[in-house]
Image (cartoon, coloured by chain):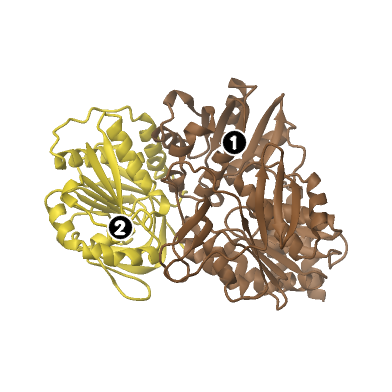
């Protein structure tokens, strides 16, 4: 008990100290807590009445956990929530030690923890989660983990430590994710039940089109994007599980989505662009409904949802709209380009590509983004490229057929952004940064007073 | 007209290797040479005499294992075509399958077609990071840049030349300083990046070989490659900053 007390207080002290010295996002609080009491995360989550919920997957973790937290709070639960990017074991630990100001055990109902795939096994072992949500598996940051199959294995190991009465919430449309629920009873699936969208070019980057059971090629009846869709393996008979929650209709112009939840019809207000955000919404709603919320509560709670910073959030600047959307892998980038193409107006883009560790040090993935298919459809009149690998981005656009006269290179992200705003002050500006470039742009916007809130989660 | 064959694009498509095909096609089109890109997967018939260049990328171990036997079954016809001067670029896993075999950490050896006198065995760690090499090909400038990410360690036999010698990075095996291999018009390498967009001199060499194969004696007029060389230079310049490690073993 003394050990836990010390761990929590020293961790908070470390947190205050690093904030005072202006080093937000330090891993120190987590390091200190775990050094003093290696079981600190277990002990703190064990006391929560609703325990821990882990969210993992390649894309959509941050938006999905922000949405889920929003929904669970609307039902009256007190939710502990880690910040985006702080999703390794140290970040999860710090979120728990810093959740209360004075007491040791936070007065909360549930800890909703966005968890990096590689951390799943350890986080799950320590927190014994009541529910695990897996969004999707796409190729991402292969310089870190090598191959996609490694990532899937990480998540599978995490699921093995699910609490006995725990639930698994899975994307039915992703074969590798759906496969994780095979043979398990307490599984909730979500998926889309809309017609396939018009694709871009047919040379899209596709990750998994092979049956995770037998390795043969999957056939698709409908395909939403990348390998997400209604699939079936003809040789072995395995197919997409029937979803408990299905997105049946999306009216982008009216900002409305219709779900079917086990025979109940839900009609939800929804303003975010892009099919990928629709998956995030379905995932969060499926999780909230699994945790006992009723459909009417979910409908009411979504009336006032605000997205996480940098995940397609509109910022008003001098009378024009600036959208910020993090890009980190080919599927996500394609989805953002599709979302841009669906929005009206005069548009310019600012692509900011860094290659620090948190961004992924290998920029090869830019060649898997379907720029050939999208540049003509996005309606973007001029492109700015910035970041450490601005030159690679410029070459990528050139080979996708963008005229060199339409590309401006300014390596400093702030300068690239400022130059675009200055050239076309009335245009809708889409800023698409990698992770550390997003942080640079956020600091810049904060200095200029354009960011209302610092919520990152 | 040039016809490029992208082999196993669905299985061997890791790390943006399709960028190499995009670069070859664009640089031909910018010079007014029409291009057709054809794909072939396992079991599909290939008329090698109709092909002017072959591209094979890298893939995950499981995917590489799924196509290895199909590729091996094509060894006779393919070896004849390569010996006759068919150009081929193979990256990472594709490079390994051009050698004698690939021995994974666990499980059976994957047979290669043995056109390149190299052998590969899975090593204990992955070589990941930027690479700058001095190529043995007659290219100006003499550097190739890319990004490596492989656990396989490849050793060259006496019947093959290295594509380059690493200035910066791990290369074929981290020991002998070689990177890639070349025989006739066949190039194997570990460089992703994508490789060709940032190395336009190598792209044009492959194009000239493809034209030769097609029997078209067309000179390749120079293009404005300033953006490409700027991207090339970003990596070359890193070598001069010793604080940044080019190789990280994880």
Read off the chain for label 2. Answer: B
Which label belongs to residue A290?
Answer: none
Drawn side of residue B74 relative to residue A270, left or right = left
Q: Residue at left 41%, top 54%?
A: B14
Q: In the structure shown, which secondary structural element does the residue marked by tag 1 occupy?
A: helix
Dot 1 and dot 2 within a common chain? no
Q: In the structure shown, which secondary structural element does the residue marked by tag 2 occupy?
A: helix
**Percent x, y of residue B75:** 19, 62
Give the residue number, with chain letter if any, for mark 1. A342
Front residue (pair A395, A255): A255
**Percent x, y of residue A143:** 47, 56
Q: Residue at left 71%, top 70%?
A: A129
Drawn side of residue A62 relative to residue A157, left or right = right
Give the residue number, with chain letter if any, for mark 2. B94
CA separation in Å, label 1 and label 2: 38 Å
Which chain can be seen in brown?
A
Drawn side of residue B184 relative to residue A214, left or right = left
Front residue (pair B141, A290): A290
Q: Residue furthest bottom?
A: A164
Chain B as rendered: colour: yellow
Q: Residue at left 64%, top 38%?
A: A324
Front residue (pair B158, A406): A406
Q: Can residue A26 be seen in this view?
A: no
**Percent x, y of residue A356:** 53, 48
Q: Is residue A153 visible?
A: yes
């Amino acid at each position: 008990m003394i050990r836990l007390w010390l761990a929590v207080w020293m961790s908070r002290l470390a947190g205050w100290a690093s904030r005072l010295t202006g080093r937000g996002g330090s891993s120190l609080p987590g390091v200190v807590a775990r050094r003093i009491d290696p079981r600190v995360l277990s002990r703190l989550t064990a006391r929560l009445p609703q325990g821990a919920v882990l969210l993992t997957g390649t894309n959509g973790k941050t938006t999905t956990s922000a949405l889920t937290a929003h929904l669970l709070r609307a039902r009256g639960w007190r939710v502990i929530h880690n910040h985006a990017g702080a999703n390794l074991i140290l970040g999860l630990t710090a979120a728990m030690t810093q959740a209360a100001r004075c007491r040791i055990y936070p007065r909360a109902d549930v800890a909703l923890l966005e968890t990096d795939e590689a951390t799943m096994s350890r986080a799950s072992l320590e927190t014994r989660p009541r529910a695990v949500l897996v969004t999707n598996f796409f190729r991402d940051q292969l310089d870190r983990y090598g191959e996609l199959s490694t990532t899937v294995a990480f998540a599978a190991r995490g699921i093995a430590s699910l609490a006995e009465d725990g639930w698994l919430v899975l994307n039915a449309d992703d074969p590798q994710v759906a496969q994780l629920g095979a043979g398990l009873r307490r599984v909730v699936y979500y998926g889309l039940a809309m017609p396939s969208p018009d694709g871009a070019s047919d040379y899209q980057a596709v990750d998994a089109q092979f049956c995770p059971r037998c390795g043969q090629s999957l056939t698709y009846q409908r395909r939403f994007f990348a390998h997400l869709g209604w699939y079936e393996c003809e040789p072995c008979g395995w197919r997409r599980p029937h979803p408990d929650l299905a997105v049946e209709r999306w009216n982008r112009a009216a900002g409305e989505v219709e779900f079917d939840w086990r025979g109940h019809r839900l009609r939800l207000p929804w303003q975010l662009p892009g099919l990928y955000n629709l998956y995030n919404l379905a995932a969060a709603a499926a999780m909230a409904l699994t945790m006992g919320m009723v459909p009417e509560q979910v409908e009411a709670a979504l009336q006032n949802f605000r997205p996480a910073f940098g995940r397609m959030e509109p910022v008003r600047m001098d009378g024009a709209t600036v959208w910020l959307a993090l890009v980190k892998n080919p599927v996500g980038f394609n989805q953002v380009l599709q979302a841009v193409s669906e929005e009206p107006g005069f548009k310019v883009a600012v692509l900011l590509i860094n290659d620090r560790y948190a961004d992924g040090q290998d920029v090869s993935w830019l060649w898997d983004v379907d720029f050939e298919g999208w540049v003509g459809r996005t309606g973007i009149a001029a492109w700015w490229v910035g970041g450490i690998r601005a030159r690679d981005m410029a070459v990528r656009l050139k080979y996708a057929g963008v005229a060199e006269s339409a590309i401006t290179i300014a390596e400093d992200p702030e300068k690239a952004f400022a130059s675009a705003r200055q050239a076309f002050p009335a245009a809708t500006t889409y800023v698409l940064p990698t992770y550390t470039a997003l942080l640079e742009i956020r600091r810049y916007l904060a200095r200029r007073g354009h960011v209302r809130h610092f919520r990152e989660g | 007209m040039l016809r490029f064959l992208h082999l196993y694009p669905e299985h061997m498509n890791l790390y943006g290797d399709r960028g190499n095909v995009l670069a070859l096609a664009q640089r031909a089109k910018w010079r007014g040479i029409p291009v057709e890109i054809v794909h072939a997967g396992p079991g599909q018939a290939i008329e090698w005499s109709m092909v002017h260049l072959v591209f094979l990328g890298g893939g995950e171990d499981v995917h590489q294992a799924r196509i290895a036997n199909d590729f091996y079954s094509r060894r006779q016809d393919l070896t004849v075509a390569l010996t006759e001067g068919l150009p081929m670029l193979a990256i990472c896993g594709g490079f390994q399958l051009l050698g004698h075999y690939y021995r994974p950490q666990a499980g059976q050896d994957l047979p290669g077609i043995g056109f390149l006198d190299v052998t590969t065995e899975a090593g204990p760690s992955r070589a990941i990071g930027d690479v700058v090499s001095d190529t043995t090909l007659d290219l100006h400038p003499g550097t190739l840049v890319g990004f490596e990410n492989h656990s396989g360690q490849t050793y060259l036999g006496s019947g093959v030349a290295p594509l380059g010698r690493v200035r910066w990075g791990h290369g074929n095996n981290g020991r002998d300083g070689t990177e890639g291999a070349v025989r006739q018009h066949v190039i194997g390498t570990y460089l992703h990046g994508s490789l060709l967009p940032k190395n336009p001199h190598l792209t044009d060499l492959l194009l000239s070989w493809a034209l030769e194969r097609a029997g078209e004696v067309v000179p390749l007029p120079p293009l404005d490659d300033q953006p490409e060389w700027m991207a090339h230079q970003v990596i070359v310049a890193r070598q001069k900053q010793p604080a940044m490690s080019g190789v990280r073993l994880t």
